[in-house]
Image (tube, grey):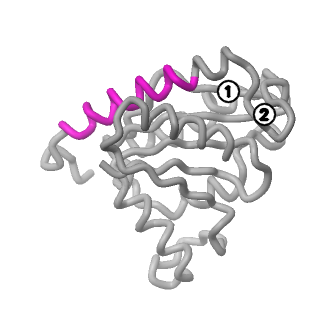
Amino acid sequence: MKILLIDGTIIGSKTGVILDQVKVYIEQLDGKLDLEILKLADFDHQFVDGRPLGEYNDDMRLLVRKFEEADGYILATPIFQGSIPGVLKNAFDLLHPRTMRYKPVSIVANGGTYQHHLVIENQLKPILDYFRCLVTPNYVYTTSSHFGEGNKIVDQDVHDRLRELARVFVQYAKMGKNLSKDTLDEH
């Protein structure tokens, strides 16, 4: 199974650090999963404006192809100004509604205050629900206080929660693998 670990920003490094750690924990649980870290910062983004996919640049088409080919996702996002980054929302706007359907998704996020965890509940989960993803019930939210020198995760509770997120994600990946493609409704 192909799993994309998506760093949903073009600036900062904490979400990448979190993804690297989740990747380690998933590999410890299931070494057969094909894990790829995808950094939105590595793409030349264009504003999604409703034109046909073929009219976007190569990077935007590659981004869609990566999402389509994946069997599951670990989504990492910073919280900026009480919201997900525009570049992440722009990427979602480019995807067909069936792209992520019945595929497992786990969420990790980082923000400046503890209250910003609500962005996951009030913005990100509704988007993923629209795509009909299998969103794991546990997500991990971090703040700057969970990181030490060099943006290393220093909080043991965060490590424990990331391990648990990885464990649950692997189970959801197995469950998603068993969902028949022919049960997808076309509406």
Label 2 element class: strand
Which of marks 2 and 1 precedes in the sequence? 2
Q: Nearer the viewer, residue 123 or 148?
A: 148
Examine the residues drawn in magenta and state their main secondary structure: helix
Amino acid type at image mark 1: Tyr
Amino acid type at image mark 2: Gly
Disc 1 marks which residue? Answer: 141
What residue is rendered at 76% in x and 35% in y?
Answer: 152
Residue 4 screen position, x and y as percent: 46, 51
Above-or-below relation of 86 to 78: below
Q: Is residue 37 left or right of residue 70?
A: right
Above-or-below relation of 42 to 134: below
Disc 2 marks which residue? Answer: 111
Q: Are marks 1 and 2 in contact (CB under 8 Å)?
A: yes
Mark 1 vs mark 2, CA separation in Å: 8 Å
Q: Is residue 87 left or right of residue 168?
A: right
What residue is rendered at 44% in x and 38% in y?
Answer: 105
Q: Which residues are magenta?
A: 162-178
What residue is rendered at 73% in x and 35% in y?
Answer: 110
Q: Nearer the viewer, residue 131 or 180?
A: 180
Above-or-below relation of 146 to 100: above
Q: Is residue 179 left or right of residue 12?
A: left
